[in-house]
Image: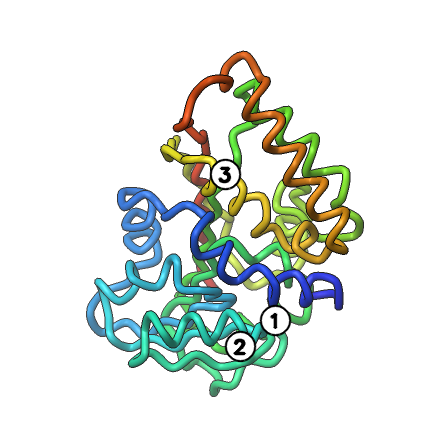
Amino acid sequence: MHTPRAALGFERSTQSYDRGRPEYPSQAALSLLDRCGIGSSSRVLELGAGTGKFTRFILGRTDHVLASDPSPAMRSRFHEKFPSVPCAGALAERIPAAAAAFDAVICAQCFHWFADAESVAEIARVLVPGGHLGLIWNVRDDRVSWMTALTEIIDRHTGDAPRYSSGEWKQVLALAGGWKDLQEETRRHVVVCDRATVLDRVASISFIAALEEPQHRQVLDQVEALLDTHPDLAGRGLWDFPYRTDLYWCERR
């Protein structure tokens, strides 16, 4: 489901993604691994592994891991961080593995990008019966007023990019058949950020990274103006960046 614009954005944003995207809170990450029954002998596929933000949690449980990501730049950064973990340049609809090859498939911050009938069927194919699909997202918490203003700056440029917030990915799973009910859990997550980290966070969004330079610079200038003028932010050098960490899991029948 990656569009050329998205692919360009991910290629351009690898460094800002690694710097600006928050780490997953340990309790949430470990809860997802528990819900998916991942232990020392589990065979795990991490789809859309990106720069490996979630990978370290999986490696804390099992060495039997295959990662994949379609972006060469993301894979290059992944290999720098995890040289012993294979990371394939594969798409979710064409997973380079045999049927029933994995006990769990994990998708961190990415399932909405490729959630369609073909990909869900392919995930089911490579999972053992009773295997689990685990999904996790760090989501900006728009209940905080300045975060609402930041989202308004960002969302002007969404275009046709798939979004987690749309919930369309849930409908794909519901219609697919062959899965038990989707379960979910949410935890609050606050990250202390300096100016550079906030700017990297925005620059790491694929459709922002894909903008032409004058428009890209304009977006970052608007973010800087928000940091300098919003009454909850002005005059400070560090800010609490509020997130929710949403996790979901379901079992293959």
What amino acid is labelled 3 in the image? Val
Question: Disc 3, disc 1: CB below 8 Å?
Answer: no
Question: Disc 1, disc 2: CB below 8 Å?
Answer: yes
What amino acid is labelled 1 in the image? Ala
Return the x and y of residue 94 as percentages of the image width and height: 60, 80
Q: Earlier in the sequence, mark 3 or mark 2?
A: 2
The color scheme shown is: rainbow
Q: Which residue is mark 3?
A: 198
Return the x and y of residue 146 as percentages of the image width and height: 57, 22
Q: What's the residue at 22%, 74% (across, down)?
A: 41
Q: Residues within 10 Å of mark 2 (few under 14, many from 20)?
A: some
Image vertical order of residue 135 relative to residue 81, above or below: above
Question: Residue 224, labelled with which disc?
Answer: none
Q: Earlier in the sequence, mark 3 or mark 1?
A: 1
| SS for callout 2 | helix
What amino acid is labelled 2 in the image? Arg
| SS for callout 1 | helix
Q: What's the residue at 64%, 55% (across, down)?
A: 206
| SS for callout 3 | helix
Q: Which residue is mark 1?
A: 121
Query: Going by the image, does 69 lie left or right of 115?
Result: left
Frontmost of labels 3 and 2 is 3
Q: What's the residue at 53%, 35% (across, down)?
A: 140
Image vertical order of residue 160 relative to residue 230, above or below: below
Occupied quadrant, residue 7: bottom right
Q: Which residue is mark 2?
A: 125
Asked whether 79 or 122 is in front, the reply is 79
The answer to whether residue 250 is seen in the rendering is no
Quadrant that contains the N terminus = bottom right
Asked whether 228 or 24 is in front, the reply is 228
Image vertical order of residue 202 relative to residue 67, above or below: above
Q: What's the residue at 57%, 59% (across, down)?
A: 13
